[in-house]
Image (cartoon, rainbow, N blue to C red):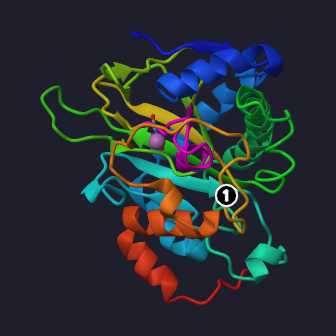
Amino acid sequence: MDALPVIDISDPDAAAPGIEAACRESGFFYVAGHGVPAALTDRLDAAARTFFDLPAPAKTEIAMARGGRAWRGFFPVGAELTSGVPDRKEGLYFGTELGPDAPAVRAGLPLHGANLFPAQVPDLRPVVLEYLSRMTAVAQTVLRGIALSLGLPAGYFAESYTADPTVLFRIFHYPPSAPDSDEWGVGEHTDYGLLTLLLQDGNGGLQVRTPGGWLDAPPIPGTFVCNIGDMLDRMTGGWYRSTPHRVRNLSGNERLSFPFFFDPDFSRPVPPLPATLHEGARRWDGQDLRAFTGTYGEYLVAKVGKVFPELFAETRHQEAPRIG
Ligand code: OGA
Ligand code: NI
């Protein structure tokens, strides 16, 4: 394999065989035929660039520390760790927009709440909320294809794990790295949930670990890079793999990327799927994902605590934020 496949998802039935092959081989593929207009992704890119160009004090007005347990807002270069090492990127964390009266917010669930939007970039709020809504539909469509590819009814996920999905969205800015740099924009890792749908600008830098070695996942206009996360690996007993990937921006330009994470219901356990599936190979980091028996939320909060240790310690000692 020397390039990741491009799969048209406009007909999930027709897409299922290609999805199965991709999820078995590398866990990565490009999604075409998704119907998200270029005008929307262009607007998102423009608003994000305007934000990252702001002076540091303006960006800090929406620092993550202000987002409390909801884990929303801005973090500067070096604040996020992958495998204990600081990443060379800054970013914005978003998720499903929930007001103070939402049951999950009242209950003080971590990672749930209101987004922090910058006053200086008024278009970011409407464009992010519109993007979340469009991408939720795309993710449910991809999951229809994945369900069919596993011999399950098309609506299997939408009726169970993702009837009330956990939706997280990030915008990352990777400053250019020197050609001889050994720093990673984001170090090698797997994603935590079901699916990630990544919009990337034209600069490239994403690499995927395949059995044949590291493979570039260069930008293809009009597509998203889709990869499966730890929960789908777990549900399928390793038949579909959540594959390590990493980013180094050697383009010389300011790289932006927009990962959308579509994950199971926060409050549900994530048992194996009913279909009889083949035993997978040993996972890259030796972890046995089936050994874990909590809810998806418990898995996610433990993972997030590793990438933002300081903020995590603070959050644990904090009361649920009183908003408004
Ligand atoms: C991630 C990720 C890739 C990118 O956020 O999990 O792998 O290009 N991002 O930003
Ligand atoms: Ni990732």
Along the horizontal axis of the image, is 249 left or right of 34?
A: left
Residue 119 visible in rendering: no
Nearer to us in this view, 54 or 30: 30
**Is residue 272 part of the magenta span, yes or no?**
no
Query: Looking at the picture, does residue 214 appear above or below residue 116?
Result: above
Quadrant occupied by the C terminus: bottom right
Q: Quadrant of residue 208?
A: top left
Work out whether residue 27 can be spotted: yes
Q: Going 38% across and 54% down the picture, which residue do you hit?
A: 287
Q: Position of residue 61 (x, y in %)?
A: 52, 65
Image quadrant in which you'd find residue 38: top right
Q: Looking at the image, which is closer to me, 266 or 114?
A: 266
Residue sitting at the far top: 2
Rendered position, 102 above or below 167: below
- Along the horizontal axis of the image, is 59 left or right of 41? left
- The range drawn in magenta is 227-243
The answer as to whether callout 1 falls within 8 Å of ligand 2 is: no
Which amino acid type is shown beneath numbered disc 1? Pro
Q: Residues within 10 Å of mark 1 (few under 14, many from 20)?
A: some
The one of 172 and 143 positioned closer to us in this rendering: 143
> Residue visible at 69% across and 64% down?
266
The image quadrant where one finds the N terminus is top left
Does dot 1 land on a helix, a strand or a loop? loop
The spot of residue 270 in percent (x, y) is 66, 58
Drawn side of residue 78 relative to residue 36, left or right: left
- Residue at image location 44% in from the left, 36% down from the top: 243
- Where's residue 157, x and y in %? 79, 44
Against 231, residue 216 (above or below) is above
Magenta-span inclusion, residue 241: yes
Q: Which residue is mark 1?
A: 271
**What is the x, y in percent for residue 240?**
55, 35
**Is 60 on the left or on the right of 199, as rendered?**
left
